[in-house]
Image (cartoon, rainbow, N blue to C red):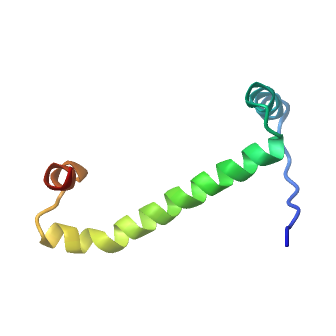
Amino acid sequence: MSTTLTIRLDDKLDAELTRLAKETHRTKSDLVRGFIRQQMARAELRRTQALLRPYAERAGYLTDEDFFHDFS
């Protein structure tokens, strides 16, 4: 099943989206779907980080660098 979503774009944003679609040989709809997916993934990452932050801090991981130092 699919849903149609209608949005308004100002002229500048529409021109930028049209240019990017032409450059990448993708439709504007395909690009926007990808942008939405990326934003939703970022939001989920932030939510997960917020949930795990107290556990990480108790384990001594105060920054991303602390974590990556031990696990990279």
Q: Is residue 49 above or below residue 55?
A: above
- Which residue: 79% across, 29% down? 12
- Which residue: 83% across, 40% down? 27
Looking at this view, name the residue that lies furthest to the left. 60
Q: Is residue 7 above or below residue 21?
A: below
In the rendered image, residue 40, in percent from the top left (x then y), is placed at: 59, 60
The answer to whether 6 appears left or right of 17 in the picture is right
Determine which quarter of the picture holds residue 71. bottom left
In the rendered image, residue 18, in percent from the top left (x then y), is placed at: 82, 31
Number of numbered discs present? 0
The answer to whether 38 appears left or right of 22 in the picture is left
Closer-to-camera residue (46/69): 69
In the rendered image, residue 7, in percent from the top left (x then y), is placed at: 85, 52
The answer to whether 40 appears left or right of 18 in the picture is left
Determine which quarter of the picture holds residue 16. top right
Q: Quadrant of the N terminus?
A: bottom right
In the rendered image, residue 53, in percent from the top left (x then y), is placed at: 27, 68
Q: Is residue 3 above or below residue 8?
A: below
Determine which quarter of the picture holds residue 10. top right
